[in-house]
Amino acid sequence: MNFNVNSSFLYIIAVCVIIFVLAQSVFFLVRAYRRGKQLGMSSAKLRKTIFSTSIFTIAPAISILLGVVTLSKFLGIPLPWIRMSVIGALTYELPAAKSAASAIGVSMAETITDPSVYTTVAWVMTLGILPSIILPPILMKKIKGGMLKIKSKDEKWGEIFMTSLFLGMISAFLGVVFADVRQGLVGFIPLFVLLVSAAIMGICGLLIKKFNLKWLETYALSISMVGALVFAVLITPVIVG
């Protein structure tokens, strides 16, 4: 029997995982609602809070959907659905999958048909994200204490330190963007997409500042991602020819 990245078995696993996560969400929602009532909060206020927070989940959901769509050609739908819906993010999942694919010598433009390749990519993506689950409970208190200590001694230096950490993380992902620039104009496609995404985010920032569009702060990231994705779809056939 041929291997299928979209087999019924993989969909069943994905559905079971998603149902478990949804059950957790409902469990804590009910407990939070009951706790709110114990604290004297009105039912109207609790319902309003639930509704407003539900609205704010739309933007992250769009980002997750884009991640699933991006990886579905290579990995099918079930695995990206599980990864993006539970703990993963496109900023990690895509580079991890690309690194594994490059090491094996397969193209992400083609759907995986070899189960050994599929399991290798899945293990790389899974093992790579495990430290983010294990290390925070162990090290977070010490890291946070150290950061607060630096900030208490010199607030300006503390802000510079935090900004440097953030820029260091961004720089790690920028390496992927410039990795193929030696391949000619085709290698510049990721850079063009990055610049368009940054431009859209900048426009959103200007609109927020000029017209005080607070709601746009929540959706700016999703809008820039969708805009960049559309641009990539349009420009790639033109450059590749």
Image: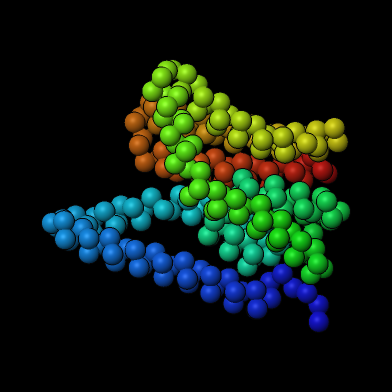
121 or 211, nearer to the observer: 121
Reply above or below: 21 against 173: below
Classify the position of the C terminus by image quarter. Answer: top right
| Residue 190 seen | yes
Reply above or below: 47 against 238: below
Reply above or below: 234 against 36: above
What kind of colouring is applied to the model shown? rainbow
**Picture quadrant of residue 81:** bottom right
74 or 128, nearer to the observer: 128
Give percent across and percent down for residue 153: 41, 19
Give percent across and percent down for residue 230: 62, 46
Give percent across and percent down for residue 44: 17, 58
Query: Given the current orientation, which residue lies at the most extreme bottom position?
Result: 1
The residue located at (67%, 61%) in the rendering is 72
Classify the position of the N terminus by image quarter. Answer: bottom right
The residue located at (30%, 52%) in the rendering is 52
Left or right: 46 with respect to 74? left
The residue located at (60%, 50%) in the rendering is 131
**Picture quadrant of residue 74:** bottom right
| Residue 220 seen | no
Count all numbered tags in the image, as a single digit: 0
The residue located at (41%, 67%) in the rendering is 24
